[in-house]
Amino acid sequence: MKNRGLLTKDSGYKLLSFLMVISLWKVLTLHFSPLIVPTMGSVLAEIHKILTSPDLYAMIPLTAGRLLAGLSLGVSLGLVLGILMGNFSQVKGVLSPLVGIMQTVPPVSWVVLALVWFGFNGKPAVFIVILSTLPVITINVCAGFRRIDKNLLEMASLYRFSKVKRLRHVILPSILPYFKSAFQIALGSGWKIAVMAEVLTTSDGIGGMIKLGRLNVEPESIIAWSILVVLLFYLSDFLIGKFLFRKETNYAATP
C-alpha cells in the first residue's frame, strides 16, 4: 500500500509538471507569432504528418544506427579503460587527465574537428557519441571497482571462490549500479549529441530533418522532431531497463 501511494504521488507530480509545460506553452502562443512559438495544434498536426510519412521510417533508423554504433564503441572502450583504471593505480594516474580532457572539451569543438577529419556525412555523429560516452562509462566503472568492499574480496579468497564465482558474486554486484547509471546518462546525452552532430554535419537522419525545418522556417517541424527524440529516448531507456538490466539484482543471489 505504501509503494502504491508513492507511485500515485510520483504520477501526480509528473502530471502536474506536464500540465505546467502545456500551460506555459499556451500562454507563450498568445504573446508570440507562430513563427516563434507555434501552436500546440500545429505541432500535433506535424507529429501526425511525420508519423504517417515515409521519412519517419527512413530517418529514425539512420540516427538510431549512428547512436548504436557510437554507444557500442564508447561503452566497450569505457569498460576496458574503467576496469584498468579501477585495478591499477598507475594506469589511473596516466589516463585520468586524458579522460578529464575528453570530458571537458565542448562537443561542438569535436564536431568541427570531426568535419575536418571525416567530412559531411554520418561519421562525425558516431565519433561524437563515442567521445561523449567513453569518459562517462570509464569514470563510473572505475569508481565501482575502487569501491568494492575489501571484506567481500577477503571472504571470497577465504572460501576459495573461483574467478568466475568471484566475478559473479562480488565484482559484478558492486560495479553494475555504477555502470547502469552511467549507461543511462550516456544514452540520454547520446541521443542529443547524435542529433546535434547530424544538424551540423549531414542532411539526413533526425538532425537533417530538424535542419530542414530551420531552413524552411518551420518551428513546428523542429519541435515535432524534438518531441519524437524525447519519446525515442524514453522508449530506448525503458527497453534497456527491462531487458538489459532486469537481472542485475540477481547476480549476488544466484548460486
Image: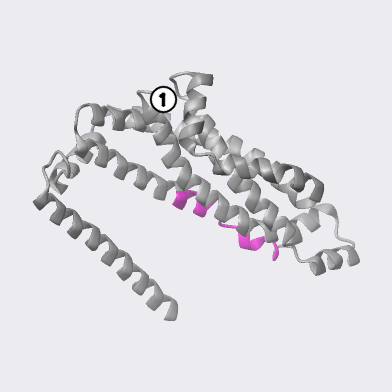
Tell me the amino acid under the disc marked 1. Thr
- Number of residue marks: 1
Question: Residue shown at 74%/52% (left/top)?
Answer: 86
Label 1 Cα neighbours within 10 Å, binned few <14 / some 14-19 / many ≥20: many
Residue 174: give x, y in percent of width and height.
Answer: 69, 61
Quarter of image, res 7: bottom left
Name the image quarter holding the C terminus. Answer: bottom right
Question: Residue shown at 76%/47% (left/top)?
Answer: 93
Question: Residue shown at 25%/41% (left/top)?
Answer: 224
Residue 129: give x, y in percent of width and height.
Answer: 51, 36
Residue 241 is one of the magenta-drawn residues: yes
Q: Which residue is mark 1?
A: 201
The answer to whether residue 222 is above or below residue 205 is: below
Please indicate whether residue 120 sits to the left or right of residue 245 in the image: left
In the displayed orientation, state which residue is furthest to the bottom: 1
Please indicate whether residue 142 sits to the left or right of residue 218 in the image: right
Residue 157: give x, y in percent of width and height.
Answer: 88, 63
Query: Can see residue 244?
Result: no
Compare residues 4 and 78 and report the one nearer the observer. Answer: 78
Residue 203: give x, y in percent of width and height.
Answer: 35, 23
Query: Can see residue 28?
Result: yes
The answer to whether residue 252 is above or below residue 62 is: below
The answer to whether residue 91 is above or below residue 152 is: above
Please indicate whether residue 217 sits to the left or right of residue 190 in the image: left
Residue 162 is one of the magenta-drawn residues: no
Quarter of image, res 36: top left
Magenta stretch in the rendered image: 237-253
Question: Residue shown at 74%/58% (left/top)?
Answer: 146
Compare residues 237 and 131 and report the one nearer the observer. Answer: 131
Check disc 1 and report its element: helix, strand or loop: helix
